Image (cartoon, rainbow, N blue to C red):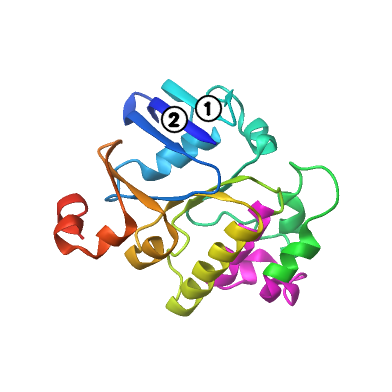
Amino acid sequence: MLEVEGLNAGYGRIPILNGIDFSIARGEIVGVLGHNGMGKTTLLRTLMGEIRATGGSITFEDEDITRLAMHRRARLGIGYVPQGRDIYPQLSVMDNLRMGEIVRRGQSAVPELLDYFPVLGALLERPGRALSGGEQQILALARCLAGRPSLLLLDEPTEGIQPSIVDQIQAKLAELAAALDLTVLLVEQNLRFIQSLAERVLIMQKGTIVATIAPEQLSDRAIVDEYLGI
C-alpha cells in the first residue's frame, strides 16, 4: 500500500529525515520507535504532506504522491491523527466529527463511528475544550476515521492519557483495524501498547530507519537498551 524510498525532509535548512526506506502492506499495523528528536513525527508529517519532501519518493496505492498537497492525500485515503490531537476546541464534538468528513463523499460515517465510540454519543454538544485528555484522543481518532481513510498515521496516541483509557484505545484500535480494513503506521513510546498492536517495529535513529524488529523482541532488555536506551 505504501512505499517510501530515500525520503529526505526537514525544516528550512535543517535536515531531519535522511534516506528513509520502508514499505507497508495493506492491512498491516507497523510501529515506529525511537528517542525524541529522531524524526518520527517529521516522518508522519512528511507522509501526510504537511512538510515537503526534499528528496526521495512516497508511493501510495501505486501512485506517486511525493508532491501532492495534504488535502489530495486525504482524499486518496490517508488519515492523520497528530501528536497533541489538534481537535477544534471551540467546536462541539459533533462539529469536530463533521469536519473530518469534509474529505469524503457519500453517506455520513458519524452514526457508525458513534457505535464504535459510544462515549462520544453523550458528548455531541460539548465543546472540544471541555473534554478530558482521553476523550479528546478518542475524538481525534473518530474525526480522522470520519474521512474513511485506508491508511492511518497515528502519532503518540497514549501521550498524557491515563492507563485505563490507554487500554481502551488499544482494544479499540485492534477492533477498528480489523472491522474497517485499516492499515496503520503507529508512532508510540509506550512499549506495551506498540507491542500489543504492531506486527513489526521500525527503529529510527537520527532521521533514518536502522532496524526492523519483531514486537516480541521488545521484551528483550538487551535489544531495548541497544536501540532505544529506555
Specify which label sits upstream in the sequence, 2 or 1. 2
The image quarter in which residue 112 lies: bottom right
Q: Which residue does the image show at 71% across and 53% down from the upper left?
A: 146
**Circles 2 and 1: CB distance less than 8 Å?**
yes
Q: Is residue 116 above or below residue 140?
A: below
Mark 2, residues whose alpha carbon is within 10 Å: few (<14), some, or many (≥20)? some
Span of residues in magenta: 117-145
Residue type at mark 1: give it.
Thr
Q: Is residue 3 left or right of residue 195?
A: right
The image quarter in which residue 229 lies: bottom left
Asked whether residue 133 is in view, the answer is no
**How far apart are labels 2 and 1 at the CA level?**
6 Å
- The residue at which mark 2 appears reads as 4
The image quarter in which residue 109 lies: bottom right
Whole-percent x, y for residue 98 in the image: 77, 54
- The residue at which mark 1 appears reads as 59
Whether 129 is among the magenta residues is: yes
Whole-percent x, y for residue 45 in the image: 48, 39
Q: In this view, does 117 lie above or below 7?
A: below
Q: Is residue 139 above or below residue 22?
A: below
Q: Is residue 52 above or below residue 195?
A: above
Q: Is mark 2 on a helix, strand or loop?
A: strand
Residue type at mark 2: give it.
Val
Q: What element carries label 1?
A: strand
